[in-house]
Structure formats: C-alpha cells, structure tokens
Image: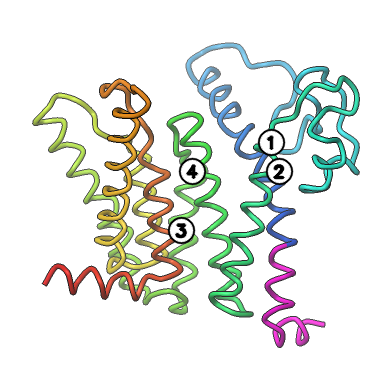
Amino acid sequence: MLGTLLGSPALFAGVCLLLGLLVGSFLNVVVHRLPVMLQRQWQVDCGGAAAEGRYDLLAPASHCPHCKAPIAWRHNIPLLGWLWLRGRCAACKAPISARYPLLELTAGVLAAAVAVRFGPGITAVAAIGLSLTLLTLTLIDIDHMLLPDAITLPGIWAGLLVNLGGTFTDLRSAVIGAVAGYLVLWLVYHLFKWLTGKEGMGYGDFKLLALLGAWLGWQALPACILLASLVGTVYGLGAILHQGRNRQQPFPFGPFLAVAGWINLMWGEALRAAYWQAAL
C-alpha cells in the first residue's frame, strides 16, 4: 500500500488533498478556539476567576454558535457537510459562515500543491506541515492581530529538527536563519520606534520570521522580507486609497510574511536567483 502510494505522484497528491481537507476541519477549531483559550489563561494569570467548564481544542464538542445544538458527525464531514446543509444549521437554520468550508478547501489545495511540487516522500509531508501552520497563523493574525507563541515557538523547533537531515537546508543555515530572522525584525522594530515613537509591528512577527528562517535557512530571509514588505505596502496603500482606511489603523503583517514564506518554500531557488540578480 505504502509502496503504491509513494510510487504514484497522482495518487499521493490525491491522498494529500483529502488529508488536507480533514486537517483543515481541525484548523477551523484551532483558529476559533486557541485565541479564546489564551485570553482565558491571561485572565487567570492576572488574578481573574477561571471560566466555568472545560474549553480547549477537544471540548466542548462542535456545536452551532447560535442555538448550541451539537453538530452531527455527518455534518462535520469537511466541505461536504456544509454543502449538504446548504450553509445552514440543521437545528435552527441559522447561516453557517462560508469561511469554514473555504478554510478546509484551502488546506486541501495547499496540501495537494505541495505534494505535486515535492513529489511523494517525507519532504512533501514536512512542507505540508509548514504550509498548514502558516495558514493557521495567517487567519489568527487577521482575526486577532496575534501570532500565538503556542504555534510559532514549536514551529521554530520543528524547523530545526526537520533540517537535522538537510530536508530544506543544512542545519547551520537553519540555526542562523532562526536567529537572524528574529533579530532583523527586532532591529527594524526598535529603529522604527526610536524614529517615530510608534510600534510598527509585534513580537509575533519576529518569531514568525525566525520560524521561516529555521525551516528555509537564512538565505531565504531577504526574499521573504522584501516580498512581504512589497505586498504589505501595496495592500496598505490600496486600503487607504480605495477603502478609506485610516492610515493610523494598524493591519497585521504576519499574513504577508506567511505568504512570502510559502512562496519561498515552493519556488525559493528561482526567487532567490532573481533577487540576487536584480540586487547585483
């Protein structure tokens, strides 16, 4: 069975697509619940009363946020469950956000794309793990302007472990990448704050770039920073000019770093070659 899977790129990509859909369903839970869990823990750490009842990634069971009715297993099938219900709760008929199936679909497509890019093997599995981690961080940062340590810090260590065998880069480059990724944005943050008196980004951004450095090596950092900055600038100007966004209103930088990191994961060598050619 394993030999058949590894011997057929098309079958491997199909299996990764299905697994991506399944993992995407769980990521919906992570994106929604992890920030709430962190907020509750923060309240306890500050001396507040602990919230009643268990609340984590496993409990309570999935339920409608409107009527609290439990969601049947057949309605939890990734993508198909939402289509089956036509986007409405089976009990109260309240609308269910299309974001849930879209996240599942995105996770599946990302997993399949990575499988096609790297082919059957452990490298593709590791790359899928990084891709879905970046997807999760992107959505949490969009919702809460937060990049949780509970994801970024284990992600840094995971990148170093993956590169013990030189999966994406050699271990030395991974260690330098993790350190440099953090320090570069740390310096930018403090320089910007010294010049303007304002905070230009959060510490979570430092850790996310350190994560990318640990996975992809220090060589990927210039392209990641440049690409994220360009896309972020274009987005910011577009939001100000076309959406009337207040220029003083912050927006998360993490999603741009995540997208830049994923592009480097997929096409890093070509991107770096183009970058250095333009720079020189």
Q: Is residue 138 magenta?
A: no
For the residues bearing labels 2 and 1, Cβ distance under 8 angstroms: yes
Amino acid carrying mark 3 in the image: Trp
For the residues bearing labels 4 and 1, Cβ distance under 8 angstroms: no
- Dominant SS in magenta: helix
Q: Earlier in the sequence, mark 4 or mark 1?
A: 1
Position of residue 86 in the picture relative to residue 267 (left or right): right
* Image quadrant where one finds the C terminus: bottom left
Label 3: few (<14), some (14–19) or many (≥20) C-alpha neighbours in 10 Å: some
Q: Which residue, given by chain and number where applicable, does mark 2 sit on?
A: 101
Q: Earlier in the sequence, mark 2 or mark 4?
A: 2
Q: Is residue 254 above or below residue 168?
A: above
Residue 33 image point, x, y percent: 64, 32
Mark 2 or 3: the one toward you:
2
Q: Which residue, given by chain and number where applicable, does mark 3 sit on?
A: 157
* Image quadrant where one finds the N terminus: bottom right
